[in-house]
Amino acid sequence: KVTVSVLYCVAFRSGPPSLMSEAPQAKSEASPAATAAAAEGKGSPGPSEGVKGRLDGVCIHCGVNMGNFLGTMTPDGPIHNECIPAFKRLQIERCVHCDCVLREARTVIGGKKLHPECVADFKAKKPFEPPRKEGTLMKFAVGRSFFSGKNWKERYFVLSKQTGLAYFENKQAYTSGKPPKNAVMLTPQVRMITKPTRLIHKDATNPSTEIIIVFFEGGEERRLLIACKNWQEHDEWVRTLETYVKNVDDPRDIRDT
């Protein structure tokens, strides 16, 4: 009896169970600082910014109705919480002339941001023409024969507006007018992965020197893995490819890195 009395007293002092379970939950709202920052357009939407919860409207990233999914309100409209990482990655400043990603060195003319090397052509109203590039690279190949394995092969690559990304047996084959062994037409659907790892391609070995071009052939997605001699050559090819391929390091390609 004594034990029962003590337990009852402890339970009573902790509060009646019915009242504790029905305690109202505080409504989650954005802080004044976060609301002010959102109103001024500072930063990208994140887990700690803007009004959160179930919102009306269409997601500014995926274009799907918000529905019953949790979202965050931004200065531009609602966004699904799960879309925020991809949305942030795509908010990249681009040169108004060449439409390539802006680097630290930039020039602003009338509120428009440009690469310094694009200023002259922009002022002259000269249309941008993507540069041509060619050189010897290593290409990872998957043998078509049952007995041939996966291997790296040296190929001569030509990148131009006319050829897309084409590769030949060697430079002599190209200069003699022979047709390319294959070519990737750089359509808007093509994507580029600038620093692939083994999580992206199991045969990738060095993110500093390798590049993947994701393209479609016969309705199927394919990945062309190429390797440069060093990181300097890698960066040169990436910079030139960026003038052709606008979808670079898409979240769907690097989500596992």
Image (cartoon, rainbow, N blue to C red):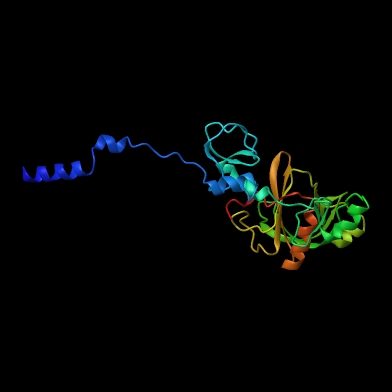
Instruction: Pick whichever, 5 or 168, lies toward us.
Output: 5
Q: Position of residue 66 (x, y in %)?
A: 58, 33
> Is residue 75 shown left or right of residue 168?
left
Q: Is residue 45 visible?
A: no
Q: Residue at x 52, y 44 (%)?
A: 30
Q: Position of residue 112 (x, y in %)?
A: 81, 51
Q: Is residue 158 visible?
A: yes
Instruction: Pick whichever, 255 or 196, lies toward us.
Output: 255
- Total numbered circles: 0
Farthest residue toward the left? 1
Q: Position of residue 101 (x, y in %)?
A: 75, 54
Quadrant containing the C terminus is bottom right
To which quarter of the image does residue 59 belong? top right
Instruction: Pick whichever, 140 or 245, lies toward us.
Output: 245
Q: Is residue 244 above or below residue 205?
A: above
> Is residue 162 shown left or right of residue 223?
right
Q: Is residue 43 above or below residue 137?
A: above
Q: Residue at x 26, y 34 (%)?
A: 18
Quadrant containing the N terminus is top left
> Is residue 123 shown left or right of residue 34?
right
Q: Position of residue 199 (x, y in %)?
A: 59, 55
Instruction: Pick whichever, 169 or 159, lies toward us.
Output: 159
Q: Residue at x 71, y 58 (%)?
A: 211
